[in-house]
Image (cartoon, rainbow, N blue to C red):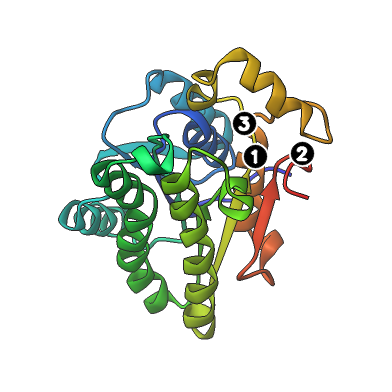
């Protein structure tokens, strides 16, 4: 299907690389007016421009630290002012600072919770106000299979991603009366720069635990985000969609 987001204003945090970049590209290819909020611009803007040209969409980068309240509010308001509304929001921004729990510093705990969970709160709060006025919208939060089953050495990361699940379900209940849907995606082991940093032996062990027998691609997570932001999921809210090859069964 083509043009699934035709003329829809879509805001995506952390859209300069990895899963976020794949979402930006796919949404633009589906005709969306895409704004990605991140500290850095995508390494290959021409790639995004080609996708937009092919699908009749558009792409614009807004420099923003989405964990900063003022910057998050200003960026979301800028999107709404230029596009006239916000139809879809994907909270994809995140980071990891792995380490054993007993050695984990408070700074590393706070940094991951703020980047992964607080940023979603700040951007969603800003965007929801516009969606409520329009009485329509879709918010998608990028959780993780780690937030559902836990993982040694990732107490901060798992806590932030589990927090997104509770946040998603609570927000879905609050906003449903205004026809604003809120869902989450829980990716498993996806080929990104973050997973490439894992030692080869550990990566192989992880892949062995996946029923489908392989790691996932950013584009496969992007497809799930497209589903949740399109009319195909018009009767879906408060759900956590696992995209993990069966890893979290």
Q: Residue at x 77, y 34 (%)?
A: 210
- Which structural element holds mark 3? loop
- Residue placed furthest toward the top: 200
Q: Are marks 1 and 3 in contact (CB under 8 Å)?
A: yes
Local secondary structure at mark 2? loop
- State whether residue 234 is above or below residue 81: below
- Residue 21 % position (x, y): 48, 32
CA distance separating discs 3 and 2: 10 Å
Residue at 54%, 62% (x, y): give it: 165
Q: Relative to residue 34, is residue 238 drawn left or right? A: right
Left or right, 3 with reference to 173? right
Label 2 CA crowd tier, 10 Å (few <14, some 14–19, many 20+) = many
Of label 1 and label 2, which has the lower sequence position? 1
Q: How many marks?
A: 3
Identify the residue position indicated by label 2 in the image.
245
Which numbered dot is residue 190? 3
Q: Which residue is mark 1?
A: 188
In the rendered image, is residue 242 in sight? yes
Gap between marks 1 and 3, in whole Å?
6 Å
At a point 41% along the width and 71% down the height, the residue shown is 131
The quarter of the image holding the N terminus is top right
Q: Earlier in the sequence, mark 3 or mark 2?
A: 3
Q: Position of residue 225 (x, y in %)?
A: 60, 49
The one of 248 and 202 positioned closer to us in this rendering? 202
- Verify CB contact (< 8 Å) between mark 1 and mark 2: yes
Mark 3: few/some/many CA within 10 Å (<14, 14-19, 20+): many
């Amino acid at each position: 299907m083509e043009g699934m987001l035709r003329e829809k204003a879509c805001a995506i945090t952390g859209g300069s690389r990895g899963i976020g970049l794949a979402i930006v590209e796919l949404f633009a290819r589906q005709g969306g007016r895409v704004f990605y909020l991140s500290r850095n611009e995508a390494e290959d803007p021409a790639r995004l421009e080609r996708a937009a040209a092919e699908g009749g969409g558009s792409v614009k980068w807004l420099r923003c630290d989405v964990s900063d309240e003022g910057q998050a509010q200003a960026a979301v308001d800028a999107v709404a002012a230029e596009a006239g509304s916000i139809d879809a929001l994907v909270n994809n921004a995140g980071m990891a600072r792995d380490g054993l729990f007993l050695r984990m510093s408070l700074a590393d705990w706070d940094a991951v919770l703020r980047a992964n969970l607080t940023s979603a709160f700040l951007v969603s709060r800003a965007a929801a106000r516009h969606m409520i006025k329009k009485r329509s919208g879709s918010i998608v939060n990028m959780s993780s299979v780690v937030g559902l089953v836990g993982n040694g050495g990732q107490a901060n990361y798992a806590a932030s991603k589990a927090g997104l699940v509770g946040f998603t379900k609570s927000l879905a209940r609050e906003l449903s009366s205004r026809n604003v849907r809120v869902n989450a995606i829980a990716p498993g082991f996806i080929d990104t720069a973050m997973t490439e940093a894992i030692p080869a032996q550990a990566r192989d062990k992880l892949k062995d635990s996946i029923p489908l027998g392989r790691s996932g691609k950013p584009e496969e997570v992007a497809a799930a985000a497209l589903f949740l932001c399109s009319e195909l999921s018009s009767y879906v809210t408060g759900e956590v969609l696992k995209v993990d090859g069966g890893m979290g069964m």
